[in-house]
Every structure is written in structure tokens, then in C-alpha cells.
Amino acid sequence: MRILLTNDDGIDAPGIAALFDAIQGMGEVRVVAPADSQSAASHGITFHRPLMMREAQPNPRMRGIAVEGRPADCVKLAARALWQEWYGPGARPDLVVSGMNAGANVGINVIYSGTVAAAVEGAFLGIPSIAVSLHLGTPGRAHFARAAEIARAAIESGRVVVPLGR
């Protein structure tokens, strides 16, 4: 399985690193994420300026592509261009995992969430997708690694990945 991992908190965020570590072994994980925080970017896309990207290695375990754009841009770019470059014509991710957002995406927050928008963009493209967020609770006590383990279990159960628009 080829997995696209993205987020809205930026490629350097602790949540995406925790998810990267947790989903290793599920398949080949490719990271394409915003170069910096795009929290509350909703489903915005970039079209008034060039969409720039660069290779990044935010930590010793994870390398990826940092995009000067929004979360939906990252999914579009990966699914429509990078995947074909990496795997050949017609290739696309088998799964989009977006997150892990630092903060709960519940209620009205889903309207503004770039994390949710990235997963929705994957679903619009017919790719099974999931958005993962973590309620932070007590300041300074975010349990990203444990939450990422739970996310992996949910993904592996197959009950939460719902391909929309198929």
C-alpha cells in the first residue's frame, strides 16, 4: 500500500512525525505537507502564485516534500503530479492520512480545519482518506505517539476509512 501523509500544522509538526512513525510497516509512506502551519486554512487552494515545493527532512526518521501552499494543495499536487513522477502514469495513493492535528477537530471546527480539508480533497479524488486530530487537554501533555497508535489501529480496522464519491 502507498500512503500519502499530510497535515495542516506543517511538515515540522510533532503530530505528523508521530503518525509517520506509527504507520510505518503499513506500506510505503510519502510525506507531502505544508512548509509551515496552515491551521484553519479550510479548503483553500493556491492559484494566484506559483506553488513552490522543496525536499525536507524535519527529523532523522522522516523525509518529505514541503509545499508553500495549503493542505488541499498538498493532496492535489501529490495525487495529480508527484505520484505519477514517483510511480508512473496513472499512479495515485492508496490512502490519504491527514494529521495529526494539534487540537480537536469537532463540531464547527471541521468547517475551518485544513486537516479535514486535506482528507476531503483525497476523498474528492476517489482516494480513501482519514483525518486525525488530538484533543490537547492539559497544556504540555500532548500524547501524540499514543494517539498515533490508536489512529493506526482505526485505519487497520477498515471501519473508519470511507471512500466518498465512489
Image (cartoon, rainbow, N blue to C red):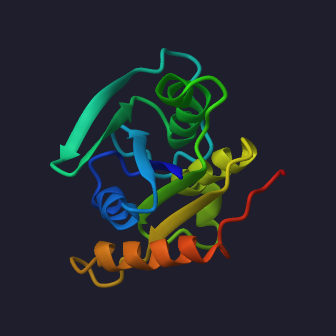
Q: Residue at x 32, y 25 (%)?
A: 54
Q: Relative to residue 124, is residue 152 drawn left or right? A: left
- Residue 80 % position (x, y): 61, 28
Residue found at the very far left of the displayed protein:
60
Residue pictured at 72% horizontal, 41% vertical: 125
Q: Is residue 99 above or below residue 50?
A: below
From this view, report whether residue 110 is shown above or below residue 38.
below
Task: Choose top left, top right, bottom left or bottom right for residue 156.
Answer: bottom right
Q: Is residue 42 visible?
A: yes
- 121 sits to left or right of 98: right
Residue 153 x %, y %: 49, 78
- The residue lying toward the viewer, choosing from 156 and 41, is 156
Furthest residue in direction bottom, as rendered: 138
- Label count reads 0
Image coordinates of residue 165 in percent, x first then y, are: 83, 51
Query: Which of 128/54 is in front?
Result: 128
Q: Residue at x 50, y 66 (%)?
A: 132
- Residue 8 shows in this picture: no
Asked whether 33 or 113 is in front, the reply is 33
Q: In this image, 113 relative to 20: left or right?
A: right
Q: Position of residue 49 (x, y in %)?
A: 50, 15
120 vs 101, left or right, is: right
- The quadrant in which residue 48 appears is top right
Residue drawn at point x = 37 percent, y = 46 percent: 37
Vertical position of residue 121 compared to residue 152: above or below: above
